[in-house]
Image: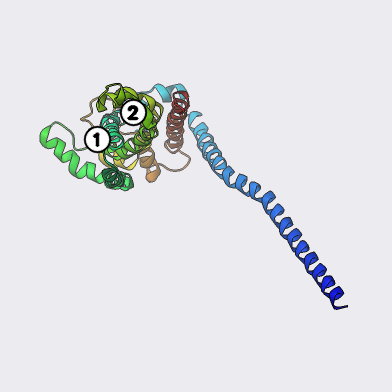
């Protein structure tokens, strides 16, 4: 009788465990079904945000192009938004943006690549652990600090050597932007070169090549896609920079190639107009969105180009 009672009690306990397991399994299955939906919604936030930004820019830019012909906007070399006979040509802004970007890349490109080569091929592990974080500190400095540094230190330094340089000019912010971009190019290029298998280096050295020859003829070609992608992303970063050029390059809308003169970039113009200079609903106000959509296209093209180059020239080992 007692044995039968124990068996019955054991059967009840097993059935309870089975029921609990079924309940847990049902909860787990429900959880597994819900999680993909939640992750999809979270991933969609970035897409929806981009679409929202694009809709805002386009809807307002259309209002501007109803007043100013699109051909006149993109081919005009005079930008006088506040004059009585206002003119809206974006070429002075594009010119200032491209010149500042070129100056920045002339600084950041060689220094960033040389830093990456040293960290990847020549520095010891101990040195790399110290230098790389120190280099990346530059990326954490606020851009407004870079702007004041360009205006209060770099510009006076340049003027002490070349007195003809203006108090505000495109050279100074271009140089400082280059310093700001160095960590991006150095870090991404170093990661690309580090990913090259050591067997390729050892094979080159075994054939009698020097360390420098191995770096130039083996490592850099193998990491070419990553290096070029870092340069393109650096260009995109320079095009979109705001505070440095706003503070140090001035607000003169000159269409010139003289880097000693003051120029204005697209981002600086957006800051100027958004700062309350123009009333909502005016042509000047809508020009902000026309310039912004142009800047959006510039940065989008550079990012797409970086992705294309990365895929086109990627080496898989």
Q: Which residue is farthest right?
A: 1
Residue 39 lies, in percent from the top left, at 60, 47
What is the number of the mark on residue 175? 1
Residue 38 lies, in percent from the top left, at 63, 49
**Which residue shows up at 30% across the image and 21% down it?**
207
Q: Is residue 276 left or right of residue 164?
A: right
Residue 292 lies, in percent from the top left, at 44, 35
Tag 2 secondary structure: helix
What is the number of the mark on residue 86? none
Q: Quadrant of the N terminus?
A: bottom right
Q: Which residue is farthest bottom?
A: 2
| Residue 250 visible somewhere in the drawing | no
Tag 1 secondary structure: helix
Model colouring: rainbow
Residue 122 lies, in percent from the top left, at 26, 35
Q: Which residue is mark 2?
A: 201
**Which residue shows up at 67% across the image and 50% down it?**
32
Q: Quadrant of the C terminus?
A: top left
Mark-to-mark CA distance, 2 and 1:
35 Å
Q: How dense is the environment of label 2, judged by Cα within 10 Å: few (below 14), some, or many (20 and up)? A: some
Camera-side mark, 2 or 1? 2
| Residue 300 visible somewhere in the drawing | yes
Q: Nearer the viewer, residue 127 or 162?
A: 127
Q: Is residue 196 left or right of residue 36?
A: left
Q: Is residue 194 left or right of residue 127?
A: right
């Amino acid at each position: 009788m007692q044995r039968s009672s124990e068996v019955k009690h054991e059967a009840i306990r097993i059935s309870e465990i089975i029921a609990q397991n079924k309940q847990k399994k049902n909860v787990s299955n429900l959880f597994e079904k819900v999680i993909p939906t939640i992750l999809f919604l979270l991933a969609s936030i970035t897409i929806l945000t981009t679409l929202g930004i694009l809709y805002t820019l386009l809807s307002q830019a259309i209002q501007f192009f109803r007043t100013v012909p699109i051909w006149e906007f993109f081919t005009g070399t005079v930008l006088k938004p506040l004059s009585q006979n206002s003119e809206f040509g974006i070429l002075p802004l594009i010119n200032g943006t491209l010149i500042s970007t070129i100056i920045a890349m002339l600084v950041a490109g060689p220094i960033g690549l040389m830093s990456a080569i040293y960290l990847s091929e020549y520095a010891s592990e101990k040195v790399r652990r110290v230098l790389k974080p120190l280099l990346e500190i530059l990326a954490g400095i606020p851009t407004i600090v870079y702007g004041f540094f360009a205006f209060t230190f770099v510009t006076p330094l340049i003027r002490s050597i070349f007195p003809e340089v203006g108090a505000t000019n495109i050279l100074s912010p271009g140089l400082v932007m280059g310093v700001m971009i160095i960590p991006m190019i150095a870090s991404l290029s170093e990661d690309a070169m580090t990913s090259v298998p050591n067997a390729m280096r050892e094979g080159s050295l075994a054939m009698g090549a020097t360390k420098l020859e191995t770096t130039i003829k083996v490592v850099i070609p193998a990491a070419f896609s990553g290096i070029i992608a870092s340069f393109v992303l650096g260009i995109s970063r320079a095009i979109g920079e705001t505070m440095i050029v706003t503070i140090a390059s001035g607000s003169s809308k000159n269409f010139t190639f003289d880097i000693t003169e003051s120029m204005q970039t697209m981002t600086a113009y957006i800051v100027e107009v958004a700062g309350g200079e123009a009333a909502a609903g005016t042509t000047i106000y809508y020009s902000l969105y026309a310039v912004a959509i142009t800047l959006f296209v510039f940065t989008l093209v550079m990012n797409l180009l970086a992705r294309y180059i990365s895929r086109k020239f990627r080496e898989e080992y």
